[in-house]
Amino acid sequence: MQVRRRRHAQTQDDAPSAQACARGPIATRNVRPSAHSGRGRDSSRCASLARQFPESCVTQLALSIRGLQKTYDNGIVALRGIDLDVAAGDFFALLGPNGAGKSTTIGIITSLVNRSAGSVKVFGHDLGTEREAALSCVGVVPQEINFNQFEKPFDIVSNQAGFYGLPRKLARERAEKYLKQLSLWDKAEVAARTLSGGMKRRLMIARAMVHEPRLLILDEPTAGVDIEIRRSMWQFVQSINAAGTTVILTTHYLEEAESLCRNIAIIDRGVIVENTSMKMLLGKLDRESLILDLADPIDVCPDIGIVQLKRVDATTLEADVPKGTSLNELFDALAKTGIRVRSLRNKANRLEELFLSLVERGPGDAK
């Protein structure tokens, strides 16, 4: 596919400032950056920032939050002094009910929201004193579609690179790279408004990745996206995480968090009520639901006494297993009824059970 080249007229007014570079992770402006040209004092400074900071994003913690508080002008207290660490290279879930403080936390990390107190460091860079360095390490995919829908995907992605001072040639190469990886290359030159909802979501991921940030924040990235597109998006995100990119995910699809994330924090009413590994959190369940794939079809669900079974279909059973129950005992009991188990897996609703119990308990009871 040949992508049409477009020339940008360089003017003093449209040359991006260093502040515009820092806005890049937020991706809320539709300014057409001209840093690709390499001319102008501000664009040169921006290019210098982009070259300098990624190499400095090498500390052990991708994100370190201490005593973070936020009270809005109307008196609403959104955050009540949270502490949170995210290790470099982690796939981290930040979960909570609506109004819990997730969006405020992300807004502060990406410099959209001013904090009332506390500190935020991104790869060791303090957001208060090293704002440009901190934000150069961050890419964010917000909940809402916020690009200019009359622009073309190729321009949306390559222009975003201008906020980081990437040279024109590199910006175009990166745009092609990520549009191809996210299966959007054949749509590179159509108006973005003609894309499907799933394509627009993928386009926002491509835009967030164009400067190859060390930390990618995904805020409800698969809301309203069908299962097939969701799966392809997660394959891409898992691949960049495997290559070293730290990922922070917020989602209402708790089965996604359970299957993708290694560590988790749950926030409720401005307080962290749980912060642990996914494995340790799920280990707190008193019982768990198992899906048993059977070697042979059955017509009737057996009654084996030791666990409660439910027939899902002819070759699938769901078992409600109390914690501590021996799986060998379960398999032996099934074998006595003539049922052979081909495979076993956890039902992906365990996190939902814990999530509901934690937020119902309330922050005042958090341990």
Image (tube, rainbow, N blue to C red):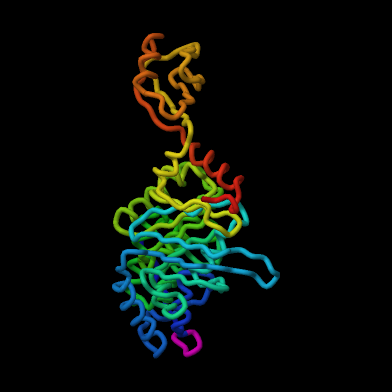
In the displayed structure, would residue 198 be above or below residue 135? above
Residue 91 x, y percent position in the rendering: 39, 53
Residue 11 falls within the magenta-colored stretch: yes
In the image, residue 69 above or below residue 102: below
Question: Which x, y percent locates residue 4?
Answer: 40, 68
Looking at the picture, how far across and down is residue 171, in whole percent?
Answer: 36, 71
Relative to the observer, which residue lies in front, 171 or 334? 334
Q: Nearer the viewer, residue 172 or 279?
A: 279
Confirm whether residue 9 shows in the render. Answer: no
For image coordinates 49% across by 37% down, the residue present is 350
Magenta part, dominant SS: loop
Q: Residue furthest top?
A: 337
The spot of residue 109 in percent (x, y) is 48, 68
Does residue 311 show up? Answer: yes
- Identify the residue at the far right of this view: 74
Q: Nearer the viewer, residue 340 or 233?
A: 340
* Quarter placement of the N terminus: bottom left
| Identity of the residue drawn at 49% across and 84% down | 14
In the displayed structure, would residue 126 be above or below residue 328?
Answer: below
Q: Is residue 238 magenta?
A: no
Count of number-bearing discs: 0
Q: Nearer the viewer, residue 32 or 218?
A: 218
Image check: 259 left or right of 308? left
Question: Compared with residue 315, is residue 363 higher up or lower down, i.e. above or below?
Answer: below
The residue located at (46%, 42%) in the rendering is: 228
User: Magenta residues?
Assistant: 10-14
Question: In the figure, residue 85 lies in which quadrant?
Answer: bottom left
